Amino acid sequence: MARPRLWHNRLAAAGLTIVGLLIVVAAAAPLIARHDPSAIDLLHPLDPPSGQHWLGTDSLGRDVWSRWIYGARISLEVGVIAVGIALLIGTLIGAMAGYYGGWIDSVLMRCVDVMLCIPTFFLLLAVIAFLQPGIGTIMVVIGITGWMGIARLVRAEVLTLKEREFIQAARGLGASDARIILRHLLPNAIAPILVAGTLGIGGAILTESALSFLGLGVQPPTPSWGNMLIEAKATLGVAWWLTVYPGLAILITVLGFNLLGEGLREQWGRR
Amino acid sequence: MSALLEIRHLSIGYRTDGGLLRAVDDVSLTVPAGQTVGLVGESGSGKSTLALAVTRLLPSPPAEMLGGAILFEGRDLLNATTQELQAIRGGQIGYVFQEPATSLNPVYTVGTQLLEAIHLHTPHRGAAATEYAVDLLTRVGMPDPAQRLRAYPHELSGGMKQRVMLAMAIAAQPKLLIADEPTTALDVTIQVQILQLLQRLQDELSLSLLFISHDWHLVESLADSVGVMQTGRLVEFGPRDVVLRQPTHPYTRHLLQSVPAVPWLEGP
Ligand SMILES: Nc1ncnc2c1ncn2[C@@H]1O[C@H](COP(=O)(O)OP(=O)(O)OP(=O)(O)O)[C@@H](O)[C@H]1O
Ligand SMILES: [Mg+2]
């Protein structure tokens, strides 16, 4: 083992810890949350952090700690599924372009170029304009607007891998194109795909927050860090806890996934 | 003596930035059933291009078939469908390539890859398939065959990897084996072992063999007939002894004169 293990790379370890904690919090949300995240208590609006409400309450008297924790669940769900969709589309298109080459490659990569020309956020807004806002929509929208980088990456990987002798050997054994792509090419490209996916989750969570903040993403009363921020905007001067905690959560989560992604990239290296 | 493989006036080009490169130029040759044809020629003369073209393995682009015919048991493979070709590759015509080190997929065990070959072309499934895999490894002289199924390619020596490649190539009991410099990357002693193995397998399975090499000694010890390639053309083709004793083409004579004497490899 010449390379340091993931754990010995401090930044990566920090990323792994953050992501791990986030997963635990999200999974155990019903256990950790101390109140129903949507329970309204009009007698106690905008309470500052206290023993009863660790992170205070919002303008409707809802417990910020509970909403924060359920928000983690939503963010993680959206991030993972959106990136899953992007990985699926990007891997498929990149693998076909790289493997077949020729006109198939040209057509697919021109599509990627065109998609990349349109500013992502504009694309997102355009797609959302036709769909009902909600968690499902936001996952799909982030997924179908975020696969282009992965397609390029997978194409580049496949281009180098397909020249390797074992691919020729597999073809010489009578393996079909689908079998060669799925069983022989992609498993050898899994490391960079996972790195891109990990980095992508951070980005997807950020996008989800931004869209929710604009009211186009996760719809109230479902809590998400983005829509918690929008609700906090009106009371920014009086209730700092309403903006600081969701803001910090987004920051730390995105940082965590980026550190982990970079750590994995270093760990697996480039062969 | 019927021809198993008959290549007629085959021409193949590579489309490059500088125009069309004729890598195989009007080559005709036959591989009779059960016999070994040796193909020699210096680097870049088109041997691999010809070998890969037989089952249409050349990537296109850049490769282009410019004309001719490739008759396998009388059928022209240039007109075959993708499905037919996939059935023939590995099923009727097996390949062994030059680089055993990189011809196995690094992420799968020997067993997984051998089973893939078995599943693709034989009816064996489940325990019977595993048993057959062990049987194949035994036949190619692999020590501890049952344990080796769980080994990853990087855990094997070059010679062992080439034995695995051979096991995969013969899994479906093909009629023709195309071996493209199968021993070039191996140590001398291992080379001899692999060659002896090739000959034994050929006898046991009544294989025809298209054996490519730039080493005259290997070709001399294995081949029934010999072809000599130079810049895409087959400049000489005939029975081994005729080509070796009375070469007609000046290029063959030139090649034969530059052959170093190798005491360790006397005929079989
Ligand atoms: N993919 C390719 N694109 C362009 N030209 C190619 C390609 N593959 C081979 N060639 C060219 O075709 C010619 C024949 O190559 P080939 O690999 O068939 O030779 P060879 O006789 O097998 O040589 P060696 O003994 O080095 O293996 C060479 O000039 C080579 O540069
Ligand atoms: Mg070659």
Image (tube, rainbow, N blue to C red):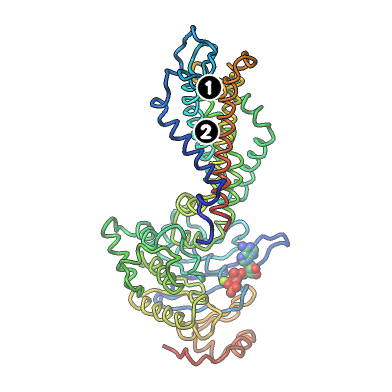
Q: Nearer the viewer, residue B41 or B157?
A: B157
Q: Number of labelled discs?
A: 2
- List the single residue furthest toward the front: A51
Q: Is residue A199 visible?
A: yes
Q: Position of residue B20 (x, y in %)?
A: 69, 63
Asked if residue B255 is positioned above or below residue A42 in the image, the reply reads below
> Looking at this rendering, what residue extends furthest in the top direction?
A43
What chain letter is assigned to the residue under label 2? A
Element class at badge 1: loop
Return the chain for callout 1: A
Residue type at the position of mark 1: Val
The three-letter code of the residue at mark 2 reads Gly
Position of the N terminus of chain B, as image quadrant, is: bottom left
Q: Residue at x 54, y 81 (%)?
A: B237
Residue at disc 2, secondary structure = helix
- Whether residue A150 is situated above or below residue B115 in the rendered picture: above
The one of B120 and A37 positioned closer to us in this rendering:
A37
Quarter of the image for residue B116 reads: bottom left
The image quadrant of residue B44 is: bottom right
Name above or below for residue A19 compared with residue A121. below
Q: Earlier in the sequence, mark 1 or mark 2?
A: 2
Q: What residue is at 50 percent from the left and 43 percent from the top?
A: A16
Mark 2, Cα crowd under 10 Å, few <14 / some 14-19 / many 20+, is many
Name the quadrant of the C terminus of chain B.
bottom left
Can residue B121 be seen from the camera position used here?
Answer: no
Residue highlighted by disc 2: A79
| Quadrant in which ligand 2 is drawn | bottom right
Look at mark 1 in the image and give the residue it sits on. Answer: A218
Residue in view at x 55 percent, y 39 percent: A257
Give the CA distance from mark 1 to mark 2: 12 Å
